[in-house]
Amino acid sequence: MQRQWRLASRPEGIPDRSHFDLVEVPIPAIEPGKAVVKTLYLGVAPVMLRYMRNETDFESPIALGSVMAGRGVAQGIESDCIDLPVGAIVQARVGWQEYALIDTSQRPAPFVLPTDLPLSHGIGAVSLSGITALVGLRDIGNVKPSDRILVSGAAGGVGSHVAEIAKALGATTVVGIAGGPEKCRRLSTAMGYDEVIDYKNQDIDQALDKTFPDGIDLYFDNVGGALLDNVLGRINRRARIVICGSISEYLIDKEKRHKFINVQNLGRQDAKMEGFFVFDYENQYPACIDTLANWVRNKTLNPVEDISEGIETMPDALADLYLGNNVGVRMVKVAEPDLPP
Ligand code: NAP
């Protein structure tokens, strides 16, 4: 038997345990062309709230009573699929459960992870968080050495990688915004940020005036809303705004979301604001993982992870994202591998 989290109800606000049921079900039997995998780590992402509300078109609707969707690091334990052999360590859409039956038709397809690095990095640095930071900075942000860079949500799963990756791509100065003194301390001591702004304890206008007296060249945005509007009023010529996410608005009804007043500045400054979705860059994953893994090996990239133990902690891990409780990549360790990785 195995444990599995099922969606019990759709949250209005921050998701919690009451929105899920933890049930015991049989471990799935092998089927032709598929593999049974054992879940080792599960990741949480802000977008899961939107899965729970059926608000995304890339994740199939989750009916109440079905297993909660999500991706994790898993090991093949039985296989009838040449690309998912027994023993392989993969990042895949396994759902919130201890064992899953998967195949290669899911999108993004399961991908094999390097095994010389901690397997937890398969949730963050050498996986979708790292790839999101890399693609966002390089392909959307076109980062340049002279850029004065600002990152919001800087101590989160994606943001915790952005300063070090920006520097690996040639940047020299990266400023991070996060909430609270402990997060801001970690931005400077563990995540490669040169200057930090604590938006919960500092006046944001004064802090941005002081930190960016000559304006902002590149903004990597994880939060959206009023802060994005503020930054739009401060951009330099040919600035680039990378819309990675808008977590400050995910819990707010459409009509109550921030009304932007500085968007015209994009035209005035010949600037660019562009969103992207990491699932659309699947063909780049192998090259990105190679690059990110090498940066971890040579300590250019030093992942910060926030790990709780046991599948029973999944709902709390998801809530932590919306409560601002995570520092770095929030994940749950579910089990040890059965076979040596
Ligand atoms: P994350 O940043 O770890 O999310 C949690 C953090 O968000 C919290 O610790 C908190 O940090 C901040 N936060 C929570 N509520 C907030 C609010 N109301 N206002 C401002 N900040 C708030 O999550 P992540 O997985 O790394 O994702 C970061 C963003 O990227 C999200 O918007 C996500 O949807 C997006 N994303 C996009 C892609 C893509 O393909 N474009 C891929 C992955 C993620 P503070 O305490 O510092 O506020």
Image (tube, helix red, strand yellow):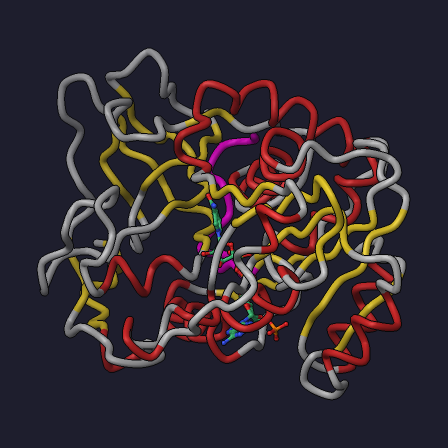
- Extreme residue toward the top, this view: 82
Where residue 100 sits in the image (x, y, percent)? 26, 41
Q: Residue at x 66, y 63 (%)?
A: 233
Tally of numbered discs: 0
Depth check, front residue: 131 or 74: 131
Q: Is residue 89 above or below residue 262?
A: above
Q: Residue at x 14, y 51 (%)?
A: 61
Residue 338 counted in the magenta span: yes
In this rendering, position of residue 251 left or right of residue 144: left
| Quadrant in which residue 316 is drawn | bottom left
Where residue 214 sits in the image (x, y, percent)? 87, 58
Where residue 58 sits in the image (x, y, percent)? 25, 42
Q: Quadrant of the C terminus?
A: top right
Instruction: State the extent of the magenta-drawn residues as a range.
Output: 330-341
Q: Is residue 9 above or below residue 166?
A: below
Secondary structure of the magenta portion, mostly?
A: loop
| Quadrant in which residue 14 is drawn | bottom left
Depth check, front residue: 11 or 35: 11
Q: Is residue 113 above or below residue 305?
A: above
Depth check, front residue: 333 or 293: 293
Residue 118 counted in the magenta span: no
Q: Residue at x 22, y 23 (%)?
A: 34
Where residue 335 sits in the image (x, y, percent)? 46, 52
Q: Residue at x 86, y 67 (%)?
A: 211
